[in-house]
Image: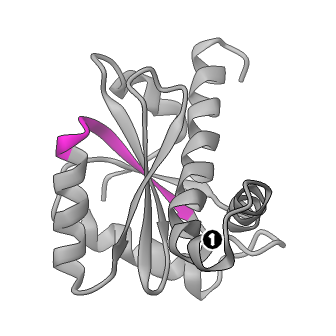
Amino acid sequence: MNIIDVETLPDLLGGGRRLMGLDLGEKTIGVAVSDAGLAFAHPRPVIARGKFTRDVETLIALAAKENVAAIVMGLPVNMDGSEGPRAQASRAFIRNAARLTDLPFVLWDERLSTVAAERALISMDVSRRKRGERIDSAAASFILQGVLDRVHALSEGRM
């Protein structure tokens, strides 16, 4: 399986390569992609979940189009640090997706990312209906931004 540590990401990133962030929901997959400078995470339209293979093929095609070097998957860890059924589902998704792509995956603790995304959308006065459409990609952006910040700290020798 091609799961790597966030600390190895700087070695993969260069030449305008980007990172993709995912927030795996039951009905949708939230998607975000970094800019070429690896400073900001930008939400992309959610992917409505259907058949697993089609979902992964859609993600792989987007990754190729966006020049993605690695995929960051939010890992829904419980507040006490344990992993429940949602975390197991995320790990299973990666395990099966890894069979269809050579892209490496990074797992990132996503505790409270959806809460933070919802607060941000509320502060931008996004209606409840539109929040529901955007929440997964906003959460993917929060997950990815955390990794981008970590990558910058690593490259500056701060961590």
Residue 111 vs residue 32: left or right? right
Task: Say which residue label 1 marks.
Answer: 76
Q: Residue at x 33, y 18 (%)?
A: 14
Residue 85, position as x, y percentages in the image = 58, 87
Quarter holding the N terminus is: bottom left
Frontmost residue, 126 versus 147:
126
Residue at the spot 41% in from the left edge and 71% down from the top edge: 29
**What is the span of residues highlighted in magenta in the rendered image?**
64-74
The reply to whether the magenta stretch includes residue 71 is: yes
> In the rendered image of this protein, does residue 122 appear above or below residue 127?
above
Q: Where 128 sits versus 159, above or below?
A: below
State the image coordinates of residue 139 (x, y, percent, origin top left): 60, 60
Point 17% across, 76% down: residue: 54
The type of residue carrying mark 1 is Pro
In the image, taking residue 19 as reference, residue 97 lies left or right, namely left
Mark 1: secondary structure: loop
136 lies left or right of 1:
right
Nearest to the observer: residue 15 or residue 83: 15
**Does the stretch in magenta take in 61?**
no
Which class describes the residues within 10 Å of circle 1: few (<14), some (14-19), or many (20+)?
many
Q: According to the image, what is the colour scheme of the structure? A: one colour
Residue at the right extreme of this rendering: 80
Specify the quadrant that holds the C terminus.
top right
Q: Judge by depth and name the residue closer to the eye, 127 or 51.
A: 127
By secondary structure, the bulk of the magenta-drawn segment is best described as: strand
Q: Is residue 66 at least partly visible in the picture?
A: yes
Q: Which residue is drawn at 48% across and 43% down?
A: 42
Instruction: From this view, report whether residue 35 is shown above or below residue 127.
Output: above
Residue 142, horizontal then vertical, whole percent? 63, 50
